[in-house]
Every structure is written in C-alpha cells, then in structure tokens.
Amino acid sequence: MSQSKSSTVAPVVLQGDLPPRGWTHRHLLDLEELTAEEIRLILDTAVMFKEATQGCRKKIDVLSGAAIVNLFFENSTRTKTSFSLAARRLGADVIDFSASTSSLSKGESFIDTAKNLEAMGVDAVVVRHGTPGTPHLLASHLDVGVINAGDGPHAHPTQGLLDIFSIRERLGDLKGLTVGLVGDIAHSRTARSNLWGLTKLGAKVILCGPPTLVSDGWQEFGVEVSHDLDAILPRCDVLNLLRIQFERQKTRPFPSVREYAHLYAMNQDRLRRAKDDLVILAPGPINRGVEVTADVADCPQSLILDQVTNGLAVRMAVLWLICGAQRNGLTRDSSEHKGQK
Ligand code: CP
C-alpha cells in the first residue's frame, strides 16, 4: 500500500461508550491485581483493535490530544516500539524519554523527573526499570496512569497479556489448557505475569527448568514444578520458552549452555513427541540454539511473531482503557497506590 493511497482512507471511529464499562484502574502494574473479568476485558478490547486495524485502516483516533511518555531505563525492541506505535495509532502524541541525555545526569531524582513530565500534562507514563517495584513507586507519586513495561524480574503485564491473547486466538478458551513455562523462571518477569494471568483464566501452569532456576517454592502459587521437560512434554498444550537472563544472574546456573540446550531446548525431536497441536511461544528476544532451535522457532506451530503482532493490539487496548477511564473520571485505585508513598 503506497503512502498516498493509505492517506485517503478515513480513520475508523469506535462506536459505543468510551471507555467500555468494567475498567476502573488508574494504573496497570501487574496482572496479580486484576480479576479474570478485567483480564478478559483487555483481551476482548484488543481483539476489537486488532480487527479494526487490519487492512488499510491503521489509525483509530480515540486518544487524540493525549500524550504518552515512554520512560525506559532498560533496553527494549518490542515493548517500547509497540507502545509508541500503539499510542500513535490511537492518535496520541508520544514522548520517548532518553535517560542518558536527560537531567538525571545532573542529579535530578527519578521522582522529580517523573513529576516534571506529569506537570507537562502527559496522560500516561509507560515505565521499564531494572528495579522491581519502580512502577509502583511512580504510581504512589503521580496522578496520571502508570503502565508497567517490565520491572526487573518482577512483572511484565502486557507481555503476559499478549502471550495469553496469542494462546486464546489459536486454541480458544484457556480453561483446561496446560501451559508449560520453560527456562529461567527465577529471573523472568514474563513467567510471573503469565502465571497470574493463566491461572486466573483457568489454565494449568507447569514451571519447568533446572533446579537452580525453578524453585519448588512456586508450588504454593498453585502451579506444578518440574525439572524434566521430556516428562511434561506430552501433557502440554502450550510451551512458553523463556530466555536465560544471564544479565540478571550473579553466578552461572548450569555447567554450560550446551548442556542446558540438551535438556531444555525445544527441538524437532521434542516436537515429534509433543501433542500434534502444541503451540510454541517465546517472549523474545530469542536465542536460537539455546531455548529453541532455529527450525522450531520458525515452524508453523510457533507463534513467536504473532505474539509481536498481538502485542500492538494489546497495548492499544491498555492505553485506551487507562487513558479513557482517567479522562472520564472512572478510576478508583489512585488513592490505594498513593497510600503507599
Ligand atoms: N519481550 C520483550 O519485552 O521484548 P523487549 O525487551 O524487546 O521489549
């Protein structure tokens, strides 16, 4: 589609109440704090945005005039880009804050920085930080919506949502499905957000990886723990293959990457021994040859790039719900988070 041709297409206008009934959160900090109904509301809203933006119609100007700040203190390809694109598709302005060139380098505090951005009239802050709890800290100081785009190993709610969206799109209702989260559970914010979202929607979760990266203590959250991928493989409807996060580890959790791949990488041999309709996810970035072989990453059962496509629709839904609720005075949880200051 050429630029001149697409610019002649009128933007889709959403019909009905804005925002949808049922959403009252000022912030999105983790899936732990959402009900199953609220998770379904986000997923259903994302379906609407995905369908509405397929084909030539890419823009839906329901957040025209809003401003979204991307406050990323850790690197990102998918999350930052898709939040930016999602905001633009909704008609909002986007500010990509650069920590390294900001006045943080002159000693300004993180909270003062955020409060100055808020004073410019932004509508929501999308934050990624290496320290767990940073989005919660921001939420306790700001009146505008805070969206967690990943806080250390703690939570990555929009990744959990897009993973669940992708499973639901391929396999339908999650109730009764068995989902294996395989790899570096100890350092994975994606694992935690998947765990909350999947169990709330009725899926059975198995955490699988080396004992140094998957503690038996996880069982108290109502999930199964296994250290043997080959043993759980025949029971799984979905495998979500998590990257080994060497950057967060103080000591090496296994003798060699080769040994890890031998025991836990998804490869053609394991694919043959799995259910015929097994679905393979990976949050990305993927390390081909470590958690998944290259051929399996690119096979028809892999939803790795579908996840990225779906992430855009999920982030449109989240931005619309958070900003829409705030614009319409429907939020109820600002005092809760403010009370944690
Ligand atoms: N999955 C994910 O969060 O990717 P990025 O780190 O590239 O944003």
Image (tube, rainbow, N blue to C red):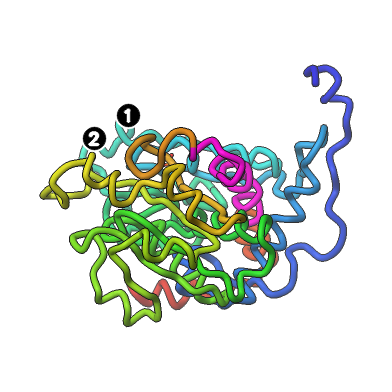
**Circle 1/circle 2 CB separation < 8 Å:** yes
Residue 210 pos. (x, y %):
24, 59
Is residue 115 something one can see in this rendering? no
Magenta range: 296-317
* Residue 125 or residue 4, whichever sits in front: 4
Residue type marked 1: Thr
What residue is disc 2 on? Answer: 105
Whereabouts is ligand 1, in terms of quadrant? top left
Residue type marked 2: Ser
Residue 11 against residue 200 in the figure, above or below: above
Q: Which image quadrant for residue 284?
A: top left
> Badge 1 local density, few (<14 within 10 Å), some, or many (20+)?
few
What residue is disc 1 on? Answer: 101
* Residue 149 or residue 273, whichever sits in front: 273
Residue 292 pos. (x, y %):
40, 42
Distance between mark 1 and mark 2 Cα atoms: 7 Å
Quick one: quadrant of the N terminus?
Answer: top right
